[in-house]
Image: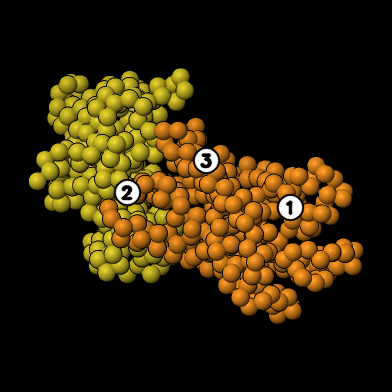
Amino acid sequence: MNILHFWRALWGITGRELRRFVTQRERFISALVRPLVWLFVFAAGFRAALGLAINPPYQTYILYEVYITPGLIGMIQLFNGMQSSLSMVYDREMGSMRSLLVSPLPRWFLLLSKLLAGTFVSILQVYVFLAIAWAYKIHAPWQGYLYIIPALILSGLMLGALGLLLSSFIKQLENFAGVMNFVIFPMFFLSTALYPLWKLKESSPLLYHLAKYNPFSQAVELTRFALYGQYNQEALLFTLAAFVVFISAAIIGYNPSKGMMIKKGGG
Amino acid sequence: MNTSPALSVSDVNFSYGAKKALDGVSFEIKPGQCTMLLGPNGAGKSTLFSLITRLYDTPSGRIELGGHDVKQDTCKALATLGIVFQQTTLDLDLSVQQNLRYHAALHGISGKVADARILEELERLGMIERRFEKVRQLNGGHRRRVEIARALLHKPSLLLLDEPTVGLDVPSRAAIVDYVHRLANTGNIAVLWASHLIDEIYPDDHLIVLHKGKIRAIGSVDAVLQTTGAGQIKDAFFKLTQGDEPR
């Protein structure tokens, strides 16, 4: 086993995820339709209702559509992370997870490769979304489209690791609905994706604190600042810390001697 | 030259909570040997496979693949192993070739070498014409052949098969049984085949009869018949498993 082996395996896992994504057209379309509906319908409806003060990284008054664009990028990555989690549970039930886990590579590397592959797929979705948003006249500085790449990698990894962690606890596919109710929705609505923190503070200090320390909020803010060429250190450190916690717990969850695999009776 | 057994299992125990699934299981498989692991449902065959493949941790005892401890030296041990699971583990939405390339990548085989080996294995299994078809379009027998080709791509020294013929029609089953036996005889590869179908056993095979987590008999077909005093494997199996009759 050498570095070339690791590289080939990573390349193989990424290629497989990409091929699966391309062949599953419905998944690609639904991944795009969801944020676009929010952008075209929800944002248009709430544009008049929600006044936004000038807050960093913005330097002028902005339309609500502009505000929620980074939140919708986060939404794409959040759903992609959960989709990966769902596909891990599915793969485990169908057995194809076994063929990955019995490969002659360290399990942490296999899980990390899965995460990187999923993140790569989510970044492709984000850029297609941004292209449509651009045509809808939502423009960011051109450098921002490059600066967000590292932010997207980190937030994609963090959200994917959360999905991976959840998949190590979910026994059956049917239980996945619970994830939607108890993870995705609270994470999305209790965040800065749809409204800024100061708005939440006005209505409820508790919700404000929950949203502030929600890792998804931090990932959205990291992307928001990067899209406007700015660096948000707090968001970076918070997202990084959340990634480390989630991936460590997921690796333990998938460890045959420590994790949940035996309790589930299969790999 | 590595003279270690292809598989060595020493005093392995495993429980699901209070229920003992494997109880002091020990055996060895040498290169070129085809060993049929017989046992009724719930005997512990799949648990044993999960321990050999390190899907489960081995809490007590020791398992070595090609001389490498699966617990201490997991990657080297797993590199010697080719596996066909009971359930199909192919990606149905990818083509035969894409599935095999994916497996080759996980074993660190370069694209060029992988493509050559894919052609070689598919040719031997009579599947070369189907390599661009999606797995979803293949019938059960052909999917199994692809899984065998996949298990052999990285040239393992031990091939594990967990009831690979379940659900297949008679000709597909016979073809796979024959192919794997020829592989063991001519390719110097060790085979451990979990089954509860007596007609899959060839006279030269070694047998391990597992029942309620314990090895009830081990040895050549003749040795097992002699030990049990039975005239046929079916009767020997019946005696050893006390009525849990195979098909």
Which mark lies nearer to you, 1 or 2? 1
Give the secondary structure at mark 3. Answer: helix
Q: Quadrant of the image for the C terminus of chain B?
A: top left
Q: Is residue A222 above or below residue A164?
A: below
**Colour of the chain lettered B:** yellow
Query: For this rendering, which residue is in front, A30 or A199?
Result: A199
Percent of width and height locating residue A27? 60, 63
Answer whether residue B181 is visible to the viewer in this image. Answer: no
Residue at label 3? Answer: A249
Percent of width and height locating residue B5? 16, 38
Crowd class of label 3 (few under 14; some 14 to 19; many from 20; radius 10 Å): some
Percent of width and height locating residue A188? 72, 53
Amino acid type at mark 3? Ala
Badge 1 or badge 2: first in the primary sequence: 2
- Describe residue A3's horizontal placement relative to residue A186 as left or right: left
Q: Chain of mark 2?
A: A
Amino acid type at mark 2? Pro
Amino acid type at mark 1? Ser
Q: Is residue B208 above or below residue B160?
A: above
- Describe residue A122's horizontal placement relative to residue B138 as left or right: right
**Colour of the chain lettered A:** orange
How many marks do you count on the picture? 3
Residue at label 1? Answer: A191
Give the secondary structure at mark 1. Answer: loop
Using the numbered discs, state the Cα–Cα distance from disc 1 to disc 2 in whole angstroms: 40 Å
Q: Is residue B14 above or below residue B137?
A: above
Residue at label 2? Answer: A104
